[in-house]
Image: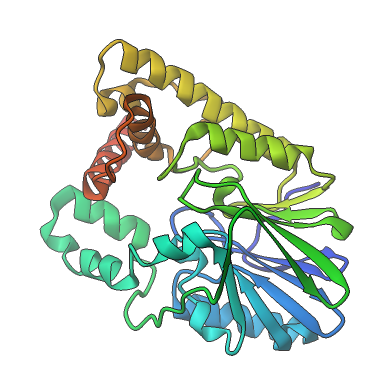
Amino acid sequence: MAETYRRGLHGLGDGLFAWLQPDGGWGWSNAGLITDGDEAILIDTLFDMTLTREMLAAMRDAVPAAANIGTVVNTHANGDHCWGNALVDGAQIVASRASAEEMAEVPPAMLASMLAAADQMGPLGDYLKTIFGSFDFAGIEERAPTRTFCERCTLTVGNRRIECIEVGPAHTKGDIIVHVPDARTVFTGDILFANGHPVMWAGPVGNWIAACDHIIGLEVDTVVPGHGPIATKAHVARLRDYLGHIRDAAKARYDAGLGAFEAARSIALDQWSDWGDAERIAVNVATLYREFSGDTNPPNVLELFSWMAQLHRDRAASR
């Protein structure tokens, strides 16, 4: 499939659509619309109310069934996939049970307060403004899932069957993918960052690799990632290779006694040099180190963002 990566609504054929937000970096997530007859299901909302409102208006203008969105599926708990939920009036909100629990852990007010204090946070604050400064987290009305599930959930829209499959914890604690068998399409949430470095907040890495293998094994032609252009299984395979590479490289450094941050700085990513947000390797290695050691404590998120800020500055200085 030729990659067409422009902002807005893209028809995928057979009543399916994707909403894309280049460049696919921090917060610039994708969403999906599945229709049959005059009914519709929305896959994910966006990072703030303005972005979600614009997306919904464009969908309703282009697709009559979008006026009747009866269900929103949140693929995971990150705000760029669920903080616009309240704008879909009357819809049931479906998510995995683990995602529903995780959504309460990082409310929009937390990110808003971090940005408000960014000017007093030095280089970390500069980085936070760079990656999140385009979004408006004030006044977001959260809407939690109204229906949760574990492992699998089957939904219908019109006469169409949709399979929600829990593959997390991986990127987050409760990731799901949404498979539309008759349209040979899968919406992956952030199990796939197409042409961008993934960020592994939760792990274990084996679950994420298994999720990639599961997608590759589906009878699908079209893969809609959580971030990036419309993709194919080749994109999934490339991300799987990345995960295997950093797992093995991090384990060698862990066994040698190298600290997590120094390990992240030393791992070569030349095969993925065309991907954005390479500084996310810091989070990925930190998560792997916790996995290797059996550490179940939650990560120090501010420290991880500080590490990413440093790597971001290092790479900018080396260009």
Displayed quadrant of residue 29: bottom right
Does 25 appear above or below 145?
Answer: above
- Report if residue 269 is visible in the image: no
Q: How many marks?
A: 0
Quarter of the view holding residue 307 = top left
The quadrant in which the C terminus is found is: top left
In the image, 145 versus 180, the foreground residue is: 145
Q: Where is residue 207 in the image (x, y as percent from the top left)?
A: 55, 37
- In the rendered image of this protein, does residue 269 appear above or below residue 202? above
Query: 15 and 212: which one is in front?
Result: 212
Q: Residue 113, percent across and down? A: 22, 69
What residue appears at the point 65 percent right and 38 percent down from the top-left corner? 212
Q: Which of 211 and 195 is in front in this view?
A: 211
Q: Position of residue 311 (x, y in %)?
A: 30, 36
Question: Can residue 157 be seen?
Answer: yes
Q: Residue at x 85, y 69 (%)?
A: 160
Q: In this view, does 165 lie above or below 80?
A: above
Q: Residue lying farthest top?
A: 256
From the viewer's perspective, is 266 left or right of 204? Answer: left
Q: Quadrant of residue 56?
A: bottom right
Instruction: Using residue 211 as the reference point, say whether residue 276 is left or right of it.
Output: left
Q: Tell me which residue sits at (35%, 39%) in the image.
A: 283
x and y percent of residue 66 in the render? 72, 83
Q: Residue at x 39, y 13 (%)?
A: 252
12 relative to 193, above or below: below
Horizontal side of 45 relative to 142 (left or right) equals right
